[in-house]
Image (spheres, rainbow, N blue to C red):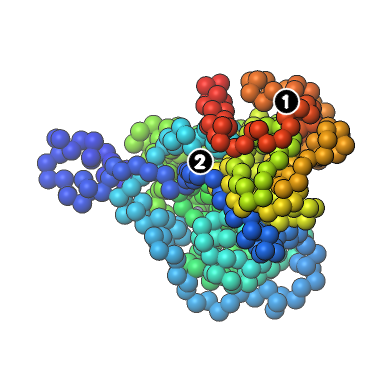
Amino acid sequence: MALKADALLLLCGVTAGLPAVAAAADGERYDPYAKMATGAHRYDMREVLQSRGKFVAEPVEQPDLSQLDSLPLSARASEPQVPGQLPEGWVQIGEVVQRREIAEGRKQIDPKPLPAWEDIEGNQYPRKGTVFLNFNGGMLKAGDDNSAENKSTLARHNHPYPVFNGSEATALTLIQAVQQDLETLGVRVLYLNRPSKTVPYTMAMVGGSWSDTNIGDPAGGVAPGTDCEDRDQRNVVYAFDSSSATISQEIAHAWGLDHTLGSDRIMSYQAGNNKHFGDNCQALCEEQCQGPGTIGCRLIHEVYCGEDSEQQNDLAELNKIFGTPEDDTEPPTVNILPDGDVIELEVGADIEVKADIHDNYGGVGWRIKVSRDGKVALDEVDYEKVGAWYFANLEAGTYEVVLEAEDHAEHVVQDKLTIFVGTPAPPTGSGGDSEGDSEGEGTTAGGDSDATGGSASDGSTSEVGPGADDKGGCECRSTDQGAGSALGLPLLGLWLAHRARRRRRA
Ligand SMILES: [Zn+2]
Protein backbone atom coordinates (compact mmCIF):
# COMPACT_ATOMS: atom_id res chain seq x y z
CA MET A 1 0.00 0.00 0.00
CA ALA A 2 1.72 3.05 -1.24
CA LEU A 3 0.97 5.58 1.44
CA LYS A 4 2.01 3.36 4.30
CA ALA A 5 5.21 2.67 2.51
CA ASP A 6 5.69 6.40 2.11
CA ALA A 7 5.05 7.08 5.76
CA LEU A 8 7.45 4.37 6.75
CA LEU A 9 10.06 5.63 4.42
CA LEU A 10 9.91 9.10 5.92
CA LEU A 11 10.48 7.54 9.30
CA CYS A 12 12.95 5.01 8.18
CA GLY A 13 15.81 6.48 10.19
CA VAL A 14 14.04 5.40 13.33
CA THR A 15 12.22 2.38 12.05
CA ALA A 16 14.35 -0.64 12.47
CA GLY A 17 13.54 -3.75 10.57
CA LEU A 18 11.64 -2.04 7.80
CA PRO A 19 11.10 -4.65 5.13
CA ALA A 20 13.52 -4.00 2.35
CA VAL A 21 10.82 -4.20 -0.22
CA ALA A 22 8.84 -1.39 1.37
CA ALA A 23 11.85 0.87 1.64
CA ALA A 24 12.74 0.29 -1.95
CA ALA A 25 9.12 0.40 -2.85
CA ASP A 26 8.43 4.00 -2.57
CA GLY A 27 9.52 7.31 -3.45
CA GLU A 28 10.11 7.70 -7.04
CA ARG A 29 7.68 10.26 -8.29
CA TYR A 30 6.74 10.50 -11.90
CA ASP A 31 3.87 11.39 -14.13
CA PRO A 32 3.08 9.06 -16.98
CA TYR A 33 0.39 11.36 -18.35
CA ALA A 34 2.17 14.71 -18.31
CA LYS A 35 4.02 13.86 -21.45
CA MET A 36 6.11 16.40 -23.28
CA ALA A 37 6.95 15.90 -26.90
CA THR A 38 9.96 17.63 -28.32
CA GLY A 39 10.86 18.62 -31.82
CA ALA A 40 8.57 19.64 -34.63
CA HIS A 41 6.27 17.28 -36.44
CA ARG A 42 8.25 16.51 -39.58
CA TYR A 43 6.74 15.95 -42.96
CA ASP A 44 8.40 15.16 -46.24
CA MET A 45 5.98 17.04 -48.45
CA ARG A 46 6.76 14.86 -51.46
CA GLU A 47 5.54 11.86 -49.49
CA VAL A 48 2.53 13.77 -48.19
CA LEU A 49 1.49 14.84 -51.67
CA GLN A 50 1.84 11.34 -53.07
CA SER A 51 0.08 9.53 -50.30
CA ARG A 52 -3.51 10.66 -50.81
CA GLY A 53 -5.37 10.85 -47.58
CA LYS A 54 -2.88 9.26 -45.24
CA PHE A 55 -2.29 12.62 -43.60
CA VAL A 56 -5.89 13.76 -43.58
CA ALA A 57 -7.97 13.26 -40.44
CA GLU A 58 -11.10 11.20 -40.91
CA PRO A 59 -14.31 13.06 -40.26
CA VAL A 60 -15.96 12.44 -36.92
CA GLU A 61 -18.81 9.96 -36.88
CA GLN A 62 -21.91 11.50 -35.44
CA PRO A 63 -23.96 9.62 -32.85
CA ASP A 64 -27.44 8.38 -33.61
CA LEU A 65 -29.59 7.77 -30.54
CA SER A 66 -32.53 6.66 -32.67
CA GLN A 67 -30.63 3.40 -33.17
CA LEU A 68 -31.48 2.62 -29.58
CA ASP A 69 -35.13 2.18 -30.46
CA SER A 70 -34.68 0.59 -33.86
CA LEU A 71 -31.73 -1.76 -33.62
CA PRO A 72 -32.76 -5.24 -32.41
CA LEU A 73 -31.22 -6.30 -29.13
CA SER A 74 -29.58 -9.26 -30.82
CA ALA A 75 -27.53 -6.81 -32.83
CA ARG A 76 -26.18 -5.26 -29.64
CA ALA A 77 -25.06 -8.43 -27.91
CA SER A 78 -21.65 -8.58 -26.35
CA GLU A 79 -19.19 -11.20 -27.39
CA PRO A 80 -19.05 -14.42 -25.38
CA GLN A 81 -17.51 -13.50 -22.08
CA VAL A 82 -13.94 -14.42 -22.67
CA PRO A 83 -11.39 -12.66 -20.50
CA GLY A 84 -9.22 -10.19 -22.28
CA GLN A 85 -5.64 -9.27 -21.67
CA LEU A 86 -4.47 -5.87 -20.52
CA PRO A 87 -1.52 -4.32 -22.29
CA GLU A 88 1.95 -4.63 -20.86
CA GLY A 89 2.42 -2.53 -17.76
CA TRP A 90 -1.19 -2.59 -16.56
CA VAL A 91 -2.87 -4.78 -13.93
CA GLN A 92 -6.44 -5.26 -12.81
CA ILE A 93 -7.13 -5.22 -9.08
CA GLY A 94 -10.79 -5.95 -8.51
CA GLU A 95 -12.57 -3.36 -10.60
CA VAL A 96 -9.62 -1.04 -10.84
CA VAL A 97 -7.13 -1.04 -13.69
CA GLN A 98 -3.85 0.32 -12.53
CA ARG A 99 -0.37 0.90 -13.80
CA ARG A 100 1.77 -1.93 -12.53
CA GLU A 101 4.49 0.21 -10.97
CA ILE A 102 1.86 2.08 -8.96
CA ALA A 103 -0.02 -1.03 -7.94
CA GLU A 104 3.24 -2.51 -6.71
CA GLY A 105 4.15 0.64 -4.82
CA ARG A 106 7.28 1.30 -6.82
CA LYS A 107 6.18 4.70 -8.05
CA GLN A 108 3.81 7.47 -7.13
CA ILE A 109 2.26 10.18 -9.22
CA ASP A 110 3.91 13.51 -8.60
CA PRO A 111 1.34 15.99 -7.32
CA LYS A 112 3.14 18.78 -9.14
CA PRO A 113 3.52 18.38 -12.87
CA LEU A 114 6.61 19.88 -14.45
CA PRO A 115 6.24 23.66 -14.83
CA ALA A 116 7.31 23.29 -18.46
CA TRP A 117 4.40 20.94 -19.00
CA GLU A 118 1.89 23.29 -17.43
CA ASP A 119 3.25 26.06 -19.62
CA ILE A 120 2.10 24.31 -22.76
CA GLU A 121 -1.03 26.05 -23.94
CA GLY A 122 -4.13 24.02 -23.12
CA ASN A 123 -2.63 22.24 -20.11
CA GLN A 124 -3.19 25.05 -17.64
CA TYR A 125 -5.86 25.07 -14.94
CA PRO A 126 -8.66 25.83 -14.69
CA ARG A 127 -9.80 24.37 -17.94
CA LYS A 128 -13.01 23.96 -19.73
CA GLY A 129 -13.73 20.32 -20.49
CA THR A 130 -15.96 18.10 -22.57
CA VAL A 131 -17.45 14.69 -21.90
CA PHE A 132 -18.80 12.69 -24.80
CA LEU A 133 -21.29 9.97 -23.86
CA ASN A 134 -21.08 7.31 -26.55
CA PHE A 135 -24.19 5.09 -26.73
CA ASN A 136 -23.49 3.95 -30.26
CA GLY A 137 -20.47 1.76 -29.70
CA GLY A 138 -18.12 1.50 -32.63
CA MET A 139 -14.82 0.06 -33.66
CA LEU A 140 -12.21 0.73 -31.02
CA LYS A 141 -8.48 0.44 -31.40
CA ALA A 142 -5.93 -0.57 -28.80
CA GLY A 143 -3.28 1.93 -27.82
CA ASP A 144 -2.70 4.91 -25.59
CA ASP A 145 -5.96 6.70 -24.93
CA ASN A 146 -7.13 9.07 -27.62
CA SER A 147 -10.88 9.55 -27.54
CA ALA A 148 -10.95 11.43 -30.84
CA GLU A 149 -9.40 8.46 -32.63
CA ASN A 150 -11.36 5.76 -30.74
CA LYS A 151 -8.10 4.56 -29.22
CA SER A 152 -8.06 3.15 -25.73
CA THR A 153 -5.71 1.38 -23.36
CA LEU A 154 -8.61 -0.84 -22.36
CA ALA A 155 -9.98 -1.57 -25.83
CA ARG A 156 -10.03 -4.92 -27.52
CA HIS A 157 -8.29 -4.07 -30.72
CA ASN A 158 -10.60 -3.84 -33.71
CA HIS A 159 -13.45 -5.22 -31.69
CA PRO A 160 -16.87 -3.81 -32.51
CA TYR A 161 -18.09 -2.29 -29.28
CA PRO A 162 -21.86 -2.88 -29.07
CA VAL A 163 -24.59 -0.28 -29.11
CA PHE A 164 -26.09 0.55 -25.70
CA ASN A 165 -28.49 -2.16 -24.63
CA GLY A 166 -31.41 0.10 -23.70
CA SER A 167 -33.95 2.52 -25.11
CA GLU A 168 -33.38 6.11 -26.18
CA ALA A 169 -35.48 7.21 -23.21
CA THR A 170 -33.20 5.32 -20.83
CA ALA A 171 -30.18 6.88 -22.48
CA LEU A 172 -31.64 10.36 -22.07
CA THR A 173 -32.31 9.71 -18.39
CA LEU A 174 -28.69 8.67 -17.90
CA ILE A 175 -27.45 11.69 -19.82
CA GLN A 176 -29.47 14.05 -17.68
CA ALA A 177 -28.18 12.47 -14.50
CA VAL A 178 -24.56 12.74 -15.61
CA GLN A 179 -25.12 16.37 -16.57
CA GLN A 180 -26.44 16.98 -13.07
CA ASP A 181 -23.45 15.28 -11.49
CA LEU A 182 -21.14 17.64 -13.38
CA GLU A 183 -23.22 20.80 -13.27
CA THR A 184 -20.99 22.72 -10.88
CA LEU A 185 -17.98 22.29 -13.18
CA GLY A 186 -16.85 23.94 -16.40
CA VAL A 187 -17.64 20.76 -18.32
CA ARG A 188 -20.11 20.26 -21.14
CA VAL A 189 -21.71 16.88 -21.78
CA LEU A 190 -22.23 16.02 -25.45
CA TYR A 191 -24.18 13.08 -26.85
CA LEU A 192 -25.97 14.24 -30.02
CA ASN A 193 -22.86 15.58 -31.66
CA ARG A 194 -19.44 14.14 -31.38
CA PRO A 195 -16.89 16.76 -30.36
CA SER A 196 -14.48 17.98 -32.99
CA LYS A 197 -11.21 16.08 -32.96
CA THR A 198 -9.38 19.31 -32.34
CA VAL A 199 -10.68 19.78 -28.83
CA PRO A 200 -9.63 17.24 -26.17
CA TYR A 201 -12.41 15.30 -24.47
CA THR A 202 -13.16 12.34 -22.23
CA MET A 203 -15.25 9.66 -23.91
CA ALA A 204 -17.46 7.30 -21.93
CA MET A 205 -18.54 4.13 -23.72
CA VAL A 206 -21.96 3.37 -22.25
CA GLY A 207 -23.21 -0.19 -22.61
CA GLY A 208 -21.46 -3.34 -23.63
CA SER A 209 -19.88 -5.68 -21.15
CA TRP A 210 -16.54 -6.07 -19.42
CA SER A 211 -15.69 -8.66 -22.05
CA ASP A 212 -15.94 -6.01 -24.75
CA THR A 213 -12.78 -4.54 -23.25
CA ASN A 214 -9.45 -6.19 -22.59
CA ILE A 215 -9.83 -6.59 -18.81
CA GLY A 216 -9.61 -10.09 -17.40
CA ASP A 217 -12.38 -10.14 -14.79
CA PRO A 218 -15.95 -8.88 -14.58
CA ALA A 219 -16.54 -5.27 -13.54
CA GLY A 220 -19.40 -2.78 -13.66
CA GLY A 221 -17.25 -0.22 -15.34
CA VAL A 222 -13.61 0.48 -15.92
CA ALA A 223 -11.27 3.39 -16.51
CA PRO A 224 -7.52 3.58 -16.95
CA GLY A 225 -6.06 4.43 -13.57
CA THR A 226 -4.03 7.29 -12.34
CA ASP A 227 -4.52 10.21 -14.68
CA CYS A 228 -4.28 12.56 -11.75
CA GLU A 229 -5.73 16.03 -12.44
CA ASP A 230 -6.65 14.87 -15.93
CA ARG A 231 -3.23 15.64 -17.31
CA ASP A 232 -4.03 13.58 -20.37
CA GLN A 233 -7.26 15.07 -21.64
CA ARG A 234 -8.28 12.39 -24.09
CA ASN A 235 -9.15 9.34 -21.98
CA VAL A 236 -11.70 6.65 -22.80
CA VAL A 237 -13.72 5.01 -20.00
CA TYR A 238 -16.40 2.31 -19.90
CA ALA A 239 -19.68 1.89 -18.00
CA PHE A 240 -21.30 -1.49 -18.49
CA ASP A 241 -24.26 -1.25 -16.16
CA SER A 242 -27.10 1.19 -16.74
CA SER A 243 -26.29 3.40 -13.81
CA SER A 244 -25.49 7.07 -14.12
CA ALA A 245 -23.33 6.85 -10.99
CA THR A 246 -21.15 4.28 -12.73
CA ILE A 247 -20.77 6.53 -15.76
CA SER A 248 -19.86 9.54 -13.62
CA GLN A 249 -17.54 7.46 -11.46
CA GLU A 250 -15.60 6.13 -14.43
CA ILE A 251 -15.34 9.62 -15.92
CA ALA A 252 -14.04 10.96 -12.62
CA HIS A 253 -11.51 8.12 -12.41
CA ALA A 254 -10.13 9.44 -15.68
CA TRP A 255 -9.76 12.81 -13.99
CA GLY A 256 -7.86 11.39 -11.04
CA LEU A 257 -10.48 10.58 -8.39
CA ASP A 258 -10.19 7.33 -6.46
CA HIS A 259 -12.80 5.37 -4.51
CA THR A 260 -14.15 6.63 -1.21
CA LEU A 261 -16.61 5.35 1.35
CA GLY A 262 -20.14 6.73 1.60
CA SER A 263 -23.39 5.43 0.17
CA ASP A 264 -24.26 8.93 -1.05
CA ARG A 265 -21.05 9.28 -3.04
CA ILE A 266 -20.51 8.70 -6.73
CA MET A 267 -16.99 7.55 -5.94
CA SER A 268 -18.25 4.81 -3.62
CA TYR A 269 -19.23 1.25 -4.39
CA GLN A 270 -21.86 1.24 -1.70
CA ALA A 271 -25.43 1.14 -2.92
CA GLY A 272 -27.30 4.36 -2.30
CA ASN A 273 -29.53 7.10 -3.60
CA ASN A 274 -28.89 10.66 -4.68
CA LYS A 275 -25.27 10.01 -5.29
CA HIS A 276 -23.08 13.05 -5.83
CA PHE A 277 -19.49 14.18 -5.79
CA GLY A 278 -18.55 15.21 -2.26
CA ASP A 279 -17.31 18.62 -1.17
CA ASN A 280 -15.63 17.40 1.99
CA CYS A 281 -12.65 15.23 2.77
CA GLN A 282 -14.06 11.73 2.68
CA ALA A 283 -12.28 8.51 3.66
CA LEU A 284 -10.65 6.75 0.74
CA CYS A 285 -11.60 3.13 0.23
CA GLU A 286 -8.56 1.10 -0.64
CA GLU A 287 -8.26 -2.28 1.02
CA GLN A 288 -11.96 -2.53 1.90
CA CYS A 289 -12.92 -1.86 -1.71
CA GLN A 290 -10.28 -3.34 -3.94
CA GLY A 291 -6.99 -4.05 -2.38
CA PRO A 292 -3.64 -2.41 -1.80
CA GLY A 293 -2.19 -0.36 -4.62
CA THR A 294 -5.51 0.86 -5.94
CA ILE A 295 -5.33 4.49 -4.83
CA GLY A 296 -3.41 5.98 -7.72
CA CYS A 297 -3.55 9.69 -6.98
CA ARG A 298 -2.92 9.69 -3.25
CA LEU A 299 -0.42 12.54 -3.24
CA ILE A 300 -2.91 14.77 -5.03
CA HIS A 301 -5.66 13.92 -2.53
CA GLU A 302 -3.23 14.88 0.23
CA VAL A 303 -2.91 18.37 -1.22
CA TYR A 304 -6.53 18.98 -0.26
CA CYS A 305 -7.00 16.78 2.78
CA GLY A 306 -3.61 16.62 4.41
CA GLU A 307 -0.69 14.27 4.47
CA ASP A 308 -1.56 10.75 5.56
CA SER A 309 -5.22 11.73 5.79
CA GLU A 310 -6.34 8.85 3.60
CA GLN A 311 -9.11 11.11 2.37
CA GLN A 312 -10.25 12.73 -0.86
CA ASN A 313 -12.27 15.89 -1.56
CA ASP A 314 -13.97 15.15 -4.88
CA LEU A 315 -15.18 18.61 -5.80
CA ALA A 316 -12.11 20.45 -4.60
CA GLU A 317 -10.05 18.39 -7.03
CA LEU A 318 -12.53 18.65 -9.88
CA ASN A 319 -12.91 22.41 -9.40
CA LYS A 320 -9.17 22.84 -9.64
CA ILE A 321 -9.26 21.14 -13.02
CA PHE A 322 -12.47 22.52 -14.49
CA GLY A 323 -13.36 25.60 -12.47
CA THR A 324 -16.99 26.63 -12.47
CA PRO A 325 -19.66 26.51 -15.20
CA GLU A 326 -19.74 30.14 -16.32
CA ASP A 327 -19.89 30.65 -20.09
CA ASP A 328 -16.67 30.94 -22.02
CA THR A 329 -17.25 33.97 -24.21
CA GLU A 330 -13.69 34.52 -25.36
CA PRO A 331 -12.30 32.69 -28.40
CA PRO A 332 -8.69 31.60 -28.49
CA THR A 333 -6.18 33.70 -30.38
CA VAL A 334 -4.10 32.00 -33.00
CA ASN A 335 -1.07 33.09 -34.94
CA ILE A 336 1.20 31.15 -37.28
CA LEU A 337 4.85 31.98 -37.16
CA PRO A 338 6.70 33.17 -39.17
CA ASP A 339 4.66 36.30 -39.16
CA GLY A 340 3.23 37.70 -42.31
CA ASP A 341 0.66 36.27 -44.65
CA VAL A 342 2.84 35.31 -47.60
CA ILE A 343 6.20 33.70 -48.13
CA GLU A 344 8.07 32.83 -51.33
CA LEU A 345 10.35 29.82 -51.42
CA GLU A 346 12.38 27.98 -53.99
CA VAL A 347 11.43 24.52 -55.16
CA GLY A 348 12.78 21.87 -52.79
CA ALA A 349 13.00 24.24 -49.84
CA ASP A 350 12.03 23.40 -46.26
CA ILE A 351 10.16 25.53 -43.81
CA GLU A 352 9.26 25.27 -40.16
CA VAL A 353 6.11 26.92 -38.87
CA LYS A 354 5.09 27.36 -35.28
CA ALA A 355 1.91 27.93 -33.36
CA ASP A 356 1.30 30.86 -31.09
CA ILE A 357 -2.01 30.12 -29.41
CA HIS A 358 -3.67 31.44 -26.30
CA ASP A 359 -6.95 30.92 -24.60
CA ASN A 360 -8.55 32.27 -21.48
CA TYR A 361 -9.01 28.70 -20.14
CA GLY A 362 -7.01 25.53 -20.44
CA GLY A 363 -8.36 22.84 -22.70
CA VAL A 364 -7.79 24.46 -26.08
CA GLY A 365 -6.68 22.21 -28.94
CA TRP A 366 -5.40 22.86 -32.43
CA ARG A 367 -4.75 21.30 -35.82
CA ILE A 368 -2.73 22.11 -38.91
CA LYS A 369 -4.07 21.94 -42.45
CA VAL A 370 -1.96 22.20 -45.56
CA SER A 371 -3.30 22.37 -49.07
CA ARG A 372 -1.44 22.71 -52.35
CA ASP A 373 -3.10 24.44 -55.27
CA GLY A 374 -6.42 24.17 -53.48
CA LYS A 375 -6.23 20.46 -52.68
CA VAL A 376 -5.99 19.34 -49.07
CA ALA A 377 -2.81 17.35 -48.54
CA LEU A 378 -2.53 17.27 -44.78
CA ASP A 379 -4.94 17.85 -41.94
CA GLU A 380 -3.85 16.65 -38.53
CA VAL A 381 -4.64 17.47 -34.95
CA ASP A 382 -1.56 18.23 -32.89
CA TYR A 383 -2.40 15.63 -30.27
CA GLU A 384 1.08 15.86 -28.76
CA LYS A 385 0.86 19.65 -28.42
CA VAL A 386 4.17 20.19 -30.07
CA GLY A 387 3.13 23.43 -31.73
CA ALA A 388 5.72 23.16 -34.52
CA TRP A 389 5.75 21.59 -37.96
CA TYR A 390 8.66 21.10 -40.32
CA PHE A 391 7.74 20.75 -43.98
CA ALA A 392 10.59 19.46 -46.12
CA ASN A 393 10.97 19.13 -49.88
CA LEU A 394 8.34 21.57 -51.01
CA GLU A 395 7.46 21.00 -54.63
CA ALA A 396 6.25 23.82 -56.83
CA GLY A 397 2.84 25.23 -56.14
CA THR A 398 0.87 27.51 -53.90
CA TYR A 399 0.52 26.17 -50.39
CA GLU A 400 -1.92 27.30 -47.78
CA VAL A 401 -1.01 26.44 -44.23
CA VAL A 402 -3.91 26.95 -41.84
CA LEU A 403 -3.54 26.71 -38.09
CA GLU A 404 -6.90 26.22 -36.43
CA ALA A 405 -7.60 26.34 -32.72
CA GLU A 406 -10.80 25.41 -30.91
CA ASP A 407 -12.03 25.77 -27.36
CA HIS A 408 -14.85 24.03 -25.49
CA ALA A 409 -17.37 26.69 -26.45
CA GLU A 410 -17.01 25.89 -30.16
CA HIS A 411 -14.99 28.99 -30.87
CA VAL A 412 -12.97 28.00 -33.92
CA VAL A 413 -10.27 30.42 -35.02
CA GLN A 414 -7.68 30.22 -37.75
CA ASP A 415 -4.58 31.90 -39.01
CA LYS A 416 -3.25 31.29 -42.47
CA LEU A 417 0.11 31.43 -44.20
CA THR A 418 0.39 31.24 -47.97
CA ILE A 419 3.62 29.87 -49.40
CA PHE A 420 4.46 30.38 -53.05
CA VAL A 421 6.98 27.73 -54.04
CA GLY A 422 8.71 28.26 -57.33
CA THR A 423 6.30 30.97 -58.40
CA PRO A 424 6.27 34.59 -57.39
CA ALA A 425 3.54 35.86 -55.12
CA PRO A 426 1.03 38.05 -56.89
CA PRO A 427 1.42 41.74 -56.14
CA THR A 428 -0.07 42.91 -52.89
CA GLY A 429 -3.74 43.65 -53.16
CA SER A 430 -4.45 41.32 -56.02
CA GLY A 431 -5.12 38.24 -54.00
CA GLY A 432 -2.99 36.13 -51.75
CA ASP A 433 -2.22 38.32 -48.87
CA SER A 434 -4.95 40.91 -48.77
CA GLU A 435 -6.87 41.49 -45.62
CA GLY A 436 -10.06 40.55 -47.36
CA ASP A 437 -8.72 37.16 -48.15
CA SER A 438 -8.46 36.13 -44.58
CA GLU A 439 -11.75 37.69 -43.59
CA GLY A 440 -14.11 35.03 -42.41
CA GLU A 441 -11.39 32.43 -41.92
CA GLY A 442 -11.93 32.67 -38.24
CA THR A 443 -15.37 31.44 -37.41
CA THR A 444 -16.87 31.63 -34.00
CA ALA A 445 -19.71 29.23 -33.77
CA GLY A 446 -20.80 30.83 -30.55
CA GLY A 447 -21.25 34.07 -32.40
CA ASP A 448 -20.45 36.13 -29.38
CA SER A 449 -19.10 39.59 -29.78
CA ASP A 450 -17.48 39.92 -26.42
CA ALA A 451 -14.04 41.00 -27.43
CA THR A 452 -12.14 41.98 -24.39
CA GLY A 453 -8.73 41.78 -25.91
CA GLY A 454 -7.94 39.19 -23.29
CA SER A 455 -4.88 37.16 -23.87
CA ALA A 456 -3.69 39.35 -26.68
CA SER A 457 -3.06 42.08 -24.17
CA ASP A 458 0.39 40.87 -23.33
CA GLY A 459 1.47 42.57 -26.48
CA SER A 460 3.28 39.65 -27.97
CA THR A 461 0.86 39.13 -30.81
CA SER A 462 0.74 42.65 -32.01
CA GLU A 463 -1.08 41.93 -35.20
CA VAL A 464 -4.04 40.73 -33.23
CA GLY A 465 -5.34 43.95 -31.89
CA PRO A 466 -7.89 44.42 -29.14
CA GLY A 467 -11.29 43.89 -30.61
CA ALA A 468 -10.00 41.48 -33.17
CA ASP A 469 -10.59 38.25 -31.42
CA ASP A 470 -14.30 38.17 -31.94
CA LYS A 471 -13.57 37.22 -35.49
CA GLY A 472 -10.68 34.91 -34.92
CA GLY A 473 -7.05 35.68 -34.81
CA CYS A 474 -5.94 36.87 -38.12
CA GLU A 475 -8.08 39.52 -39.71
CA CYS A 476 -6.34 42.65 -38.75
CA ARG A 477 -2.77 41.90 -39.57
CA SER A 478 -1.26 44.41 -41.86
CA THR A 479 -0.40 43.40 -45.37
CA ASP A 480 3.26 44.19 -45.28
CA GLN A 481 5.66 41.31 -44.66
CA GLY A 482 6.27 40.31 -48.19
CA ALA A 483 8.24 37.47 -49.45
CA GLY A 484 10.86 35.20 -48.28
CA SER A 485 12.51 37.12 -45.54
CA ALA A 486 11.01 35.55 -42.49
CA LEU A 487 11.80 31.87 -42.60
CA GLY A 488 11.41 29.66 -39.60
CA LEU A 489 14.77 29.69 -38.00
CA PRO A 490 15.03 33.19 -36.62
CA LEU A 491 11.69 32.67 -34.94
CA LEU A 492 12.33 29.40 -33.22
CA GLY A 493 12.36 30.92 -29.80
CA LEU A 494 8.97 32.55 -29.92
CA TRP A 495 6.78 29.65 -28.89
CA LEU A 496 8.82 29.06 -25.79
CA ALA A 497 9.18 32.71 -25.04
CA HIS A 498 5.47 33.04 -25.13
CA ARG A 499 5.00 30.20 -22.74
CA ALA A 500 7.32 31.84 -20.34
CA ARG A 501 5.40 35.06 -20.50
CA ARG A 502 2.17 33.38 -19.69
CA ARG A 503 3.71 31.63 -16.77
CA ARG A 504 4.89 34.84 -15.24
CA ARG A 505 1.43 36.25 -15.45
CA ALA A 506 -0.14 33.21 -13.86
ZN1 LIG B 1 -14.37 2.85 -9.84
Residue 203 visible in rendering: no
Q: Residue at x 33, y 47 (%)?
A: 107
Q: Residues within 10 Å of mark 1 (few under 14, many from 20)?
A: some
Circle 2 sits in a helix, a strand or a loop, which is it? Answer: helix
Amino acid type, mark 2: Glu
- Placement of 392 over or under 158, stated as above or below: above
Q: Position of residue 189 (x, y in %)?
A: 69, 47
Looking at the rendered structure, which numbered label has been put on residue 463?
Answer: 1
For the point 80% across and 36% down, the residue is 433
Q: Check the picture and name the quadrant holding the C terminus.
A: top right
In this view of the protein, can residue 30 be seen by the observer? Answer: yes
**95 with respect to 455 (left or right):** left
Nearest the camera: 51 or 321? 51
Seen from the viewer's position, the closer of residues 149 and 394 is: 394
For the point 38% across and 43% down, the residue is 30
Q: Which residue is mark 2?
A: 229
Circle nearer the viewer, 2 or 1: 1
Q: Residues within 10 Å of mark 2 (few under 14, many from 20)?
A: many
In the foreground, 172 or 79: 79
Q: CA distance from mark 2 to mark 1?
A: 35 Å
Can you give x and y, in whole percent of width and height, for residue 456 in the image?
A: 68, 24
